[in-house]
Image (cartoon, coloured by chain):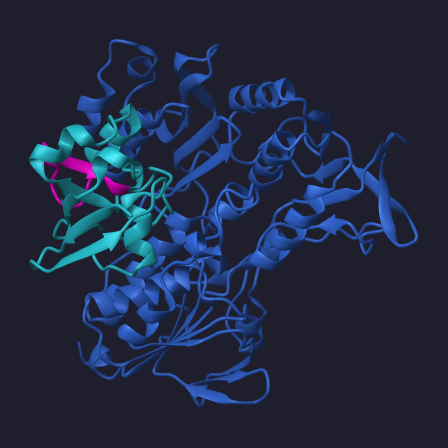
Chain colours: A blue, B cyan
């Protein structure tokens, strides 16, 4: 492929899971040109999932978070530019401009800029004690506050908020979760699973307010002391975690004239309208054969790593459509949630396993189409679900409901 | 400190000190060994830390949970009788001297 032969320098903006994996995959697959990996955080690239779990809990240190040791980058000739935000993309001259003015030329540019916390426009949001949990610096700050916390309010009952709640309860901290919708993780799991997780958290002492909006954060001497809900209730808190989701970092792309729409818009090969620019990971809005609605933008390690490998293949002259099956996981105290596929838009849910005991899978259907499978404390089901869905296979609702149906065999069977 | 020997697919051997409580996967990643990807960071979610344990040492390893067993059905390099996910091999005294072989590919 002539275009591939011309690529001597790949510049990657963003050194999270997607950016790191792309650099690593390029080298692993024999790319011989320059690889420049630019990140705006000062650290070596690190894993984010443990931040809200074992790292916050103090069970592991930064060495266990690192993707690879520092020597890896030298050995694989990956030019890591850490702690340097990118200010602009100059598409005409094929260069990115770092904050400070330095230019880095590219033959191919990959935007792996990730996402940032959604910050609600609440009175009191600037108070000391208002925390976030997305990057290492935020987690460090949160960890220190948690050590002397008298009471935490979590705004937003999604993965991050609930993972935090589990760690905080483990340390004996009172936790109250405020959720705008009527159930936890409403965007990602079925109502049965929301109910299961709410029960599990309540058993450990977490309190919930559902269907409630936060009106304002109150404080004294610049420090947060309480959270006021729209029904007038005041919840005491010296720590408030804002966990209402993220927004994609798309402003660099937008300023460069690339299409953005809840993410940097890319095609089925993850390329923007400019053939010299791709976008991967949390910042990319892409068409997925696994989704009822397109484009989708996903926030997941799987998505980041598989996007990276797809673009690495293309840059090495083996272009193909991105078709990987999305999967997700969350660990909340003793509870383990694993999701295969994209369940948004489901109309029917079939439970398989022991729901009362909290060891089951929820098969989510739209009409006859199996969209995805949530597995709760059922890791084997999840492994089978991934293989089944990745192969484009399905099981009927009746099969899913039948305890004698052999899911392992269905997953192992070759596609027709 | 206990040791684990990693044999790469192309035949190179590396012996690392692996503290008790650290997994065979974590030690490999900390030292930047190629051949173990460990995409999920050790949550038994991705099957990219697949290794083959020397047959006569299998009994020294911790027993396999159903989740690991199921994940091993989907490894990129075909599963063998001595396949394990190295994130689940947490170092214990009886595992000192463990020898693991890395498969051709993890993804």
| In magenta segment, residue A280 | no
Give coordinates of residue A387: x percent, y percent: 25, 35
| Highlighted magenta segment, given as a residue range | B75-86
In this picture, residue A265 sits left or right of residue B91: right
A386 or B53: which is nearer to us? Answer: B53
**Is most of the magenta stretch helix, strand or loop?**
loop
Q: How many marks?
A: 0
In this picture, residue B8 sits left or right of residue A220: left
Q: Is residue A42 above or below residue A381?
A: below
Does residue A387 appear anywhere in the picture?
Answer: no
Q: Residue at x 37, y 48 (%)?
A: A302
Q: Residue at x 58, y 76 (%)?
A: A255
A363 or A66: which is nearer to us? Answer: A66
In this picture, residue A371 sits left or right of residue A128: left
Furthest residue in direction right, as rendered: A221
Give coordinates of residue B42: x percent, y percent: 36, 43
Q: Residue at x 71, y 25 (%)?
A: A207
Does residue A31 appear anywhere in the picture?
Answer: yes
**In which quarter of the view is residue A343 placed?**
top left
Q: Is residue A57 above or below residue A182?
A: below
Q: Is residue A287 above or below residue A88?
A: above
Give coordinates of residue A10: x percent, y percent: 34, 77
């Amino acid at each position: 492929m002539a275009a591939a032969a011309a690529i001597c320098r790949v510049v990657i903006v963003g050194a999270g899971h997607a950016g790191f994996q792309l650099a690593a995959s390029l080298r692993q697959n024999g790319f011989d040109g320059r690889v420049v990996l630019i990140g705006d955080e000062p650290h070596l690239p690190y894993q984010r999932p443990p931040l809200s779990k074992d790292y916050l809990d103090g069970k592991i240190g930064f060495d266990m978070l690192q993707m690879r040791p520092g020597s890896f980058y030298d050995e694989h000739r990956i030019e890591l530019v850490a702690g340097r935000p990118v200010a602009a993309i100059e598409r005409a001259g094929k260069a990115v401009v770092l904050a400070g003015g330095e230019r880095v030329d590219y033959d191919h540019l990959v935007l792996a800029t990730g996402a940032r916390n959604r910050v609600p426009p609440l009175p009191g949001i600037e108070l000391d004690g208002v925390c976030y949990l997305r990057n290492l610096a935020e987690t460090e700050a949160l960890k220190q506050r948690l050590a002397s916390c008298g009471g935490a309010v979590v705004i937003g009952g999604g993965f991050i908020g609930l993972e935090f709640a589990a760690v905080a309860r483990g340390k004996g901290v009172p936790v109250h979760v405020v959720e705008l919708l009527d159930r936890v993780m409403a965007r990602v799991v079925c109502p049965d699973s929301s109910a299961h997780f709410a029960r599990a958290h309540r058993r450990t002492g977490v309190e919930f307010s559902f269907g409630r909006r936060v009106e304002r954060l109150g404080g004294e001497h610049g420090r947060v002391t309480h959270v006021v809900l729209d029904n007038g209730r005041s919840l005491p808190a010296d720590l408030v975690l804002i966990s209402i989701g993220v927004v994609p970092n798309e402003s660099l792309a937008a300023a460069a004239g690339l299409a953005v729409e809840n993410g940097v818009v890319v095609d089925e090969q993850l390329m923007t309208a400019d053939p010299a620019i791709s976008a991967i990971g949390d910042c990319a809005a892409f068409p997925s054969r696994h989704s009822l609605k397109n484009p989708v933008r996903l926030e997941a390690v799987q998505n980041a790593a598989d996007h990276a490998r797809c673009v690495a293949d293309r840059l090495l002259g083996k272009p193909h459509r991105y078709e990987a099956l999305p999967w997700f996981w969350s660990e909340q105290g003793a509870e383990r949630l694993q999701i295969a596929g994209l369940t948004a838009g489901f109309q029917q849910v079939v439970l398989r396993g022991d729901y009362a005991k909290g060891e089951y899978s929820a098969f989510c259907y739209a009409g006859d189409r199996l969209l995805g499978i949530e597995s709760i404390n059922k890791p084997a089901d999840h492994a089978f679900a991934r293989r089944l869905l990745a192969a484009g296979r399905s099981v009927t609702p009746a099969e899913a409901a039948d305890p004698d149906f052999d899911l392992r065999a269905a997953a192992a069977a070759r596609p027709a | 400190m206990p040791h684990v020997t990693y044999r790469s697919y192309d035949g190179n051997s590396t012996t690392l000190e692996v503290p008790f409580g650290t997994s065979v996967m974590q030690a490999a990643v900390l030292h930047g060994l190629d051949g173990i990807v460990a995409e999920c960071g050790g949550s038994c979610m991705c099957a990219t830390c697949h290794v083959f344990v020397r047959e006569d040492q299998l009994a020294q390893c911790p027993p396999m949970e159903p989740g690991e067993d199921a994940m091993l059905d989907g490894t990129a390099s075909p599963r063998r009788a001595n396949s394990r996910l190295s994130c689940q091999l947490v170092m214990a005294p009886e595992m000192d001297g463990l020898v693991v072989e890395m498969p051709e590919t993890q993804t």
